[in-house]
Amino acid sequence: MRDQSIHLCARGAAVALLGATCWLTTACSTLQNLGTPIGHGSHARLAAPGVAASRDRVDQILEDRAPNLEDRDRQGVIDAIFSAQQEHGFEPSLLLALMQVESGFNPSARSSQGALGLMQVQPFSGQLMARELGIEWRGKSTLLDPEQNVRIGVAYLARMHETFRDIELSLAAYNVGPGRLQEILESGKRPTGSYARKVKSSQAELASVSSPARP
């Protein structure tokens, strides 16, 4: 997320996000690629073909890719991932890909813009989402708790999807911020889709390396 305060509005209408007239520090990473169209109507699941998510598979990926996660934290992250699948329909592979793209699975990651943790959440945005989720806010240290970081990041992504109703646009909003994305859409353009493609590429790669061998 870039460190910027922007007013969240729904697509095509002045619908406040995160509460009425809420100004939010947004954009969950530093990549910003704008201009040409991307496709409409992608379903939120973005499932990798033929790959069934399971706790064992997710645990394997996190154990391999996030060696800095303690066992207890890894299990907490897995719980958060599968809660997100149940509540929002996000496939575990999508959330794992976001973590890889955003932080390289580093739970202590800190960007030059101040974003923190596995899903690179800005403290201001994180505090607002934590309040909605009933998570005790202990300052920036809350976002360095891997499980809480994922729960907060997932809630933010879910809000983007509630607003834009399109997973590629939701990923773009997670990346550049909903206000900036709204400006692009209102200008008659669409994002290039490069961030969504990067996430989907990561998703496919993770599914490939974690899939059991077929006879």
Image (cartoon, rainbow, N blue to C red):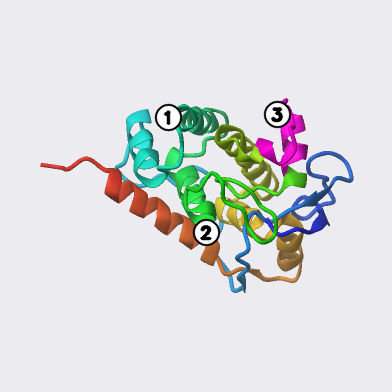
Q: Position of residue 43 (x, y in %)?
A: 51, 46
Q: Which mark is residue 71?
A: 1
201 relative to 73 in the view: left or right: left
**Mark 3, secondary structure of its residue:** helix
Q: Residue 41 versus residue 10: which sits nearer the camera?
A: 10
Q: CA distance from mark 2 to mark 3?
A: 26 Å
The amino acid pointed to by label 2 is: Ala
- Closer to the N terminus: mark 2 or mark 1? 1
The amino acid pointed to by label 1 is: Asp
Q: CA distance from mark 2 to mark 1?
A: 30 Å
- Closer to the N terminus: mark 2 or mark 3? 3
- Closer to the N terminus: mark 3 or mark 1? 1
Q: Which mark is residue 133?
A: 3
137 relative to 194 in the view: left or right: right
Which quadrant is the C terminus positioned in?
Answer: top left
Give the foreground label among 2 and 1. Answer: 1
Which quadrant is the N terminus positioned in?
Answer: bottom right
Which residue carries the number 2 mark?
A: 196
Which residue is located at x 49 percent, y 31 percent? 73
Q: Position of residue 129 (x, y in %)?
A: 73, 37
**Residue extending furthest left?**
215
Counting other residues with Cα less than 10 Å from the Cα at mark 3, is it few (<14), some (14-19), or many (20 or more)?
few
**Mark 2, secondary structure of its residue:** helix
**Residue extending furthest bottom?**
35
Instruction: Give the extent of the magenta segment.
Output: 126-142
